[in-house]
Image (spheres, rainbow, N blue to C red):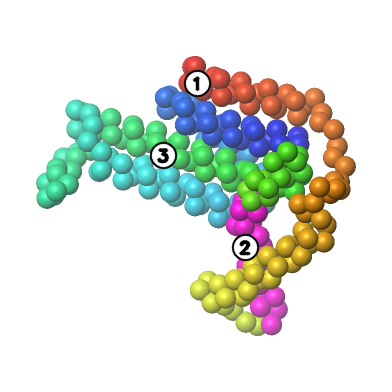
Amino acid sequence: MSPAPAAALLAALAVAALLSTSLWSVGAICALLLLVALRAPAQRRWPYLIGTLSTALLFVVLTPFVEVIGTHVLWSGPTIPVIGRLDVTTEELRNGLFQGLRLAAVGLAFAVYALLLDHDRLLAAAGWARRSTVAVALATRLVPLLERDARDLRVALRGRGVELGPVRQLSPLLAGSLERGLNLAEAMEARGYGRADRTRAPRPPWTLLDRLGLVVAVAIVVVGVLWL
């Protein structure tokens, strides 16, 4: 499938998770996105999965202590000044799990976007909004590029018998990012970016699967609005 329909499907799943009012439907969306994210190489996917799932789990744990809803008390704690009485109800647990799954669905959709989509082809497909898509593509590729640079830096240093901690790696990574930015700007200028008579690389035509992906993306949003 081409990157544009795939991105539309991911956006539709994230929107459906935000629109849904059913715990099971949001959980199903999260499970589907997690299975897709697991197709990425193991060394690349774990930072995204750990960051997304740990944040969602933290949201689930903290919500019952900062929210006051429900009458079915499972645990009643001490009274804290300003905050009030700490208690945990079944309604708070359910709402915390629901909101955590929503957050996980959005995070997993972005993880799949960053890990599996070809951002260059996606940028080329949005020629009608080139300036906006350039900014979006550069922003979303920042984390994967930094991750690749850090991995290459560790391998190069290990070959020389040197080990750097995470903090000491920041300086060479920052220098590499600045150098890459200059190289990118020179490449864009050399290729005539922004000129009226610019050239464009040929793109393969959309297949039936691509068109079907767009239809399914619209259908997912409609189902999320009406039935989920």
Question: Residue shown at 22%/29% (left/top)?
Answer: 70
Above or below: residue 116 compared with residue 189:
above
Residue 159 on image: x %, y %: 70, 78
Q: Extreme front residue here?
A: 196
* Label whose residue precedes the other's in the sequence (2 or 1): 2
Q: Extreme top residue here?
A: 226
Residue carrying label 3:
100
- Residue 32's label in the rendered image is none
Q: How would you rate the neighbour count of disc 1 (Cα within 10 Å): few for under 14, some for 14-19, many for 20 or more? A: some
Residue 11 on image: x %, y %: 59, 35
Residue carrying label 2:
146
Q: Nearer the viewer, residue 125 or 208?
A: 125
Q: Are marks 2 and 1 in contact (CB under 8 Å)?
A: no
The verdict on residue 131 being magenta is no
Decide if residue 169 is in sight here: no
Question: Residue shown at 84%/49% (left/top)?
Answer: 198
The type of residue carrying mark 2 is Leu
Secondary element under disc 1, as helix, strand or loop, is helix
* Label whose residue precedes the other's in the sequence (3 or 1): 3
Distance between mark 3 and mark 1 Cα atoms: 20 Å
Q: Nearer the viewer, residue 34 or 124?
A: 124
Q: Is residue 27 left or right of residue 207?
A: left
Distance between mark 2 and mark 3 Cα atoms: 27 Å
Q: Which residues are magenta?
A: 137-160
The type of residue carrying mark 1 is Val
Question: Residue shown at 82%/61% (left/top)?
Answer: 190
Residue carrying label 1:
225
Above or below: residue 112 compared with residue 226:
below
Q: Quadrant of residue 95?
A: top left
Q: How would you rate the neighbour count of disc 2 (Cα within 10 Å): few for under 14, some for 14-19, many for 20 or more? A: some
